[in-house]
Amino acid sequence: MSDVNGFVYRWTNIINDMWYIGSHAGTVDDGYVGSGVAFKKALHSYGKHNFEREILYEGTEFRAVEKHLLKTADASRDDTSYNLINGSNDNIPPPRFGADNPMSNPVYRKRLSDAKKGRSNGREGYKHTEETKQKIRSSNLNNGYRHSDSVKEKMKELANRPEHIERCVNIAKRQKGCRWCNNGIIERMTHDLPNGWAYGRLRRTI
């Protein structure tokens, strides 16, 4: 086991729900963002303000945890993931989550089950106040990041390329009949429910 402390993180694109999982030797507030090739391209295209970060683990086993999560989700073959490989070191054994796995908690499993059945989650009928709505509008307009006209034209050009359109069509075909499921840490779309997973999406924490 390494004596170096680090953390495992997940960035989620709030525009298209695509995600990226990575790890870093350091602290959660040292300014590190991520190093994935596809992820950095998406970050540049959409802007950091359209991504949300969650910390999945902190400790000395951060590399092993990252690899375990990526292999569990088979991230490199998941069309909703920016990860191109499932970890970087095949010699690190996966950690044992045991009681730390949220899916081993009956309260958490019941919460997922209730959500699946459409029971109350305590937020039915909730509406933003006009003041909150205005703050959201102002934040979207004045977040300090705007694409230049040249970047916008480039994005349009890429979106209209035949290979991009074909890829989008193929993704839609593969996802037909899929349902969201999660293991308490990672969520993905699949036709068949993996062992130890539950249908439904994870709740985002702000």
Image: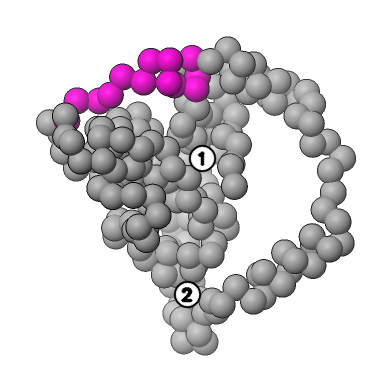
Left or right: 30, with 61 as reference point: right
Residue farthest to the left?
Answer: 91
**Range drawn in magenta:** 92-104
In this view, 149 is above or below 62: below
Residue drawn at 25 percent across, 35 percent down: 60
Residue drawn at 58 percent across, 42 percent down: 205
Q: Between disc 2 and disc 1, whose residue precedes?
A: 2
Q: Secondary structure at mark 2?
A: helix
Left or right: 183, with 40 as reference point: right
Is residue 85 visible in the rendered image? The answer is yes
The chosen color scheme is one colour
Provide residue 145's location: percent of width, then percent of height: 54, 76
Residue 202, quarter of picture:
top right
Provide residue 39's location: percent of width, then percent of height: 37, 58
Provide residue 47's location: percent of width, then percent of height: 49, 68
Is residue 87 rendered magenta in the image? no
Q: Which mark is residue 175?
A: 1
Q: Name the residue that disc number 2 marks.
A: 155
Q: Disc 2 and disc 1: Cα gap in Å?
A: 24 Å
Q: Amino acid at mark 2?
A: Met
Left or right: 136, with 84 as reference point: right
Left or right: 9, with 24 as reference point: right
Q: Secondary structure at mark 1?
A: helix
Residue drawn at 54 percent across, 62 percent down: 50
Number of marks in the rendered image: 2
